[in-house]
Amino acid sequence: MNLDLKNKRAIVCGSTQGIGKAVAMQLAAMGAHVTLVARNEPALKQTKAELANNGHQLHSYLCVDFSDTNALKELLTSFIQRSGPVNILVNNTGGPPSGPIASAKTEEFLQAFNNHLICNHILTQACLEGMKNTGYGRVINIISTSVKQPLPNLGVSNTIRAAVANWAKTMANELGKFGITVNNVLPGATSTQRLANIIETKAAKNNLQNDVVKNEMLHEIPLGRFAEPSEIANAVAFLASPAAAYINGINLPVDGGRTGNL
Ligand SMILES: NC(=O)c1ccc[n+]([C@@H]2O[C@H](COP(=O)([O-])OP(=O)(O)OC[C@H]3O[C@@H](n4cnc5c(N)ncnc54)[C@H](OP(=O)(O)O)[C@@H]3O)[C@@H](O)[C@H]2O)c1
């Protein structure tokens, strides 16, 4: 099985912590030149220093806030003109705040749509020509199992994830003929800052200890534990590899079996 990413160039968004950082580490370990994307420059520098470098890899980073789509577009376009084509794009960023849908504000939907769907689109468009020219394209979107089964108290997130999944499937249908695959990885509860925030918010709102909320969540997972970010990264890395060339347009839950449907 060919998992070699030597001479492949990857952009990994949301890669200063959590799932994105684990993905960047894994792709670099498999030989890719990795470009990190996030807002926090010291954390970007730190993560870049932690990436595997087998003596031939050129890693870099782009510091940008997804709230500013014009800045993202300009930065990406000039980066690609300067550095050459990108083969692997991992679309990922921070999730929308939790809360019931009935009280969600219009601005929350707009911001989530912007940071997830519009930014994915800008990034993908910027990478397309290079993927077509090199005959190797992998677009992998980190979404959520809510694509298959809405999660309680994540109203805005549930809504936007479905839009991203439909955008991705439509892209997969259009781009397959160029040797470009588009797939979604759907993490279940994964031990990151995002999960810690969700647990804390729910515990505070219901006047419970964090551990009570945590144990309720664990109870819903057949494997009885949260995922490590590296376990989500393994799935992403496989989809990015030559071995996954015939996998296209799928939603892959990596959730310890939590999602109830088939
Ligand atoms: N963890 C889970 O249990 C879980 C489960 C299902 C789905 N997910 C989803 O998977 C994705 C990643 O989750 P995670 O737990 O790894 O999240 P995380 O720990 O909050 O990390 C988010 C990453 O995105 C970057 N980021 C956030 N806002 C940004 C912005 N406006 N512009 C540019 N970069 C931004 C952050 O870096 P900077 O702060 O440096 O910008 C960070 O590197 C999220 O969409 C999340 O909702 C997570």
Image: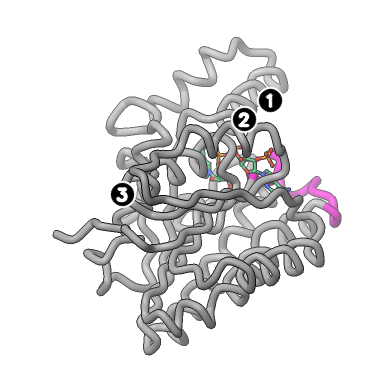
240 over 29 or under it: above or below: below
Which span is picked out in magenta? Answer: 94-107
Q: Is residue 251 visible?
A: yes
Labelled disc at residue 30: 3
Question: Residue 133 versus residue 234: which sits nearer the camera?
Answer: 133
In which quadrant will I find the C terminus?
bottom left
Question: Residue 19 versus residue 251: which sits nearer the camera?
Answer: 19
- Given the image, on which type of amino acid does mark 2 rest? Ile
Q: Categorize mark 1 by other alpha carbons within 10 Å: few (<14), some (14-19), many (20+).
A: some
Q: Secondary structure at mark 2?
A: helix
Whereabouts is ligand 1, in terms of quadrant? Answer: top right
Instruction: Indicate yes or no: mark 2 CB to ligand 1 under 8 Å.
Output: yes
Q: Nearer the viewer, mark 1 or mark 3?
A: 3
Label 1, label 3: how far apart the Cα atoms are: 37 Å
190 over 131 or under it: above or below: above
Q: Categorize mark 3 by other alpha carbons within 10 Å: few (<14), some (14-19), many (20+).
A: some
- Given the image, on which type of amino acid does mark 3 rest? Met
Give the percent coordinates (x, y) of residue 137: 41, 73
Question: Which mark sits nearer the N-terminus, 2 or 3?
Answer: 3
Label 2, label 1: how far apart the Cα atoms are: 5 Å
27 over 25 or under it: above or below: below
Circles 2 and 1, Cβ within 8 Å, touching? The answer is yes
| In this rendering, position of residue 115 left or right of residue 8 | right
Give the percent coordinates (x, y) of residue 240: 35, 61
- Number of numbered discs: 3
Q: Categorize mark 2 by other alpha carbons within 10 Å: few (<14), some (14-19), many (20+).
A: some
Q: Which residue is mark 1?
A: 201
